[in-house]
């Protein structure tokens, strides 16, 4: 149990285009999902908290108009990077809260490269 | 400043050796988790500790949560090359729903 998937696993896009990343909880319902960003050889940085049926809560310094988050169902949250630039290239990882506030399980991550 | 500190940042040891990784904070956490992450993959949950002083064992891994719930340690006995990876601790703050991550300890176990 507690499996989280992400799609795509990697994507290359041109500067100025938008990219959507999906995060799904496969065998459980997740009212809360989290989106993280990780640069090479660094730890995870929380970008936003996604709650089903309501607006996402963004961390300080994260542009909500650039990183659009939609948590439309109890098993799916999406992150759209709008007007992507090379500096948006990173490893994006989602996680889903499972069985209460104390546990979260991570997806395998999505490697975004903006050329 | 980091809410959670981890030490050491890097550790390279020979197969069969023992090691301990530390996770420290001045804040109290309602729970603390340890993850292992391999390159290009998401973190995998190893353990969640909730009670101050709690000790949990997972095969050769022993996890301890400090009495004051501000720190934790991960001890690996007889390390193997398969233990190589980035070890991350993450704390859940009281009354919050977010998890705070430490900077990680990068472990390399040489055969």
Image: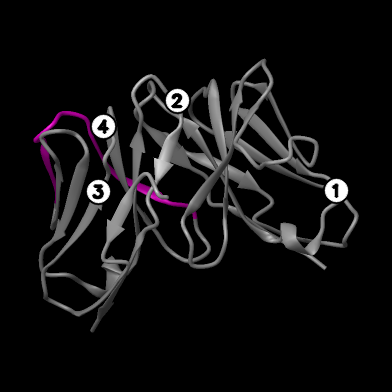
Name the side, left or right, on which A108 lies relative to A11: left
Location of residue B34 in the rendering, given as x and y in whole percent from the top left corner: 30, 47
Q: Secondary structure at mark 2?
A: loop
Q: CA distance from mark 1 to mark 2?
A: 29 Å
Q: Secondary structure at mark 4?
A: loop
Residue B80's quadrant in the figure?
bottom left
Q: CA distance from mark 3 to mark 4?
A: 10 Å
Q: Are marks 3 and 4 in contact (CB under 8 Å)?
A: no
Disc 1 sits on a residue from what chain?
A
Q: Are marks 2 and 4 on the same chain?
A: yes
Mark 3 or 2, nearer chain start = 3
Q: Residue at x 19, y 34 (%)?
A: B69
Q: CA distance from mark 2 to mark 4?
A: 14 Å
Location of residue A110 in the rendering, given as x and y in whole percent from the top left corner: 63, 54
Residue B28 is labelled as 4
- In this rendered view, identify the residue nearer to me: A3 or B109: B109
């Amino acid at each position: 149990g507690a499996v989280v998937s992400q799609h795509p696993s990697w994507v290359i896009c041109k500067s100025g285009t938008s990219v959507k990343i999906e995060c799904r909880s496969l065998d459980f319902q997740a009212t809360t999902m989290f989106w993280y960003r990780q640069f090479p050889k660094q730890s995870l940085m929380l970008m936003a908290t996604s709650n089903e049926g309501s607006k996402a809560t963004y961390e300080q310094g994260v542009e909500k108009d650039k990183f659009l988050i939609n948590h439309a169902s109890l098993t799916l949250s999406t992150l759209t990077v709008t007007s992507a630039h090379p500096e948006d290239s990173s490893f994006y990882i989602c996680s889903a809260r499972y069985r209460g506030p104390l546990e979260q399980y991570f997806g395998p991550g999505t490697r975004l490269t903006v050329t | 400043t980091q809410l959670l500190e981890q030490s050491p940042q890097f550790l390279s040891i020979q197969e069969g050796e023992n090691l301990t990784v530390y996770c420290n904070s001045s804040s109290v956490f309602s729970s603390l988790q340890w993850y292992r992450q391999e390159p290009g993959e998401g973190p995998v949950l190893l353990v969640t500790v909730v009670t101050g002083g709690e000790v949990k064992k997972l095969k050769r891994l022993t996890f301890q949560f400090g009495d004051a719930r501000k720190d934790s340690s991960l001890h690996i006995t007889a390390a193997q090359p398969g233990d190589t990876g980035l070890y991350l601790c993450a704390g859940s703050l009281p009354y919050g729903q977010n998890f705070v991550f430490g900077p990680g300890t990068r472990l390399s176990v040489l055969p």
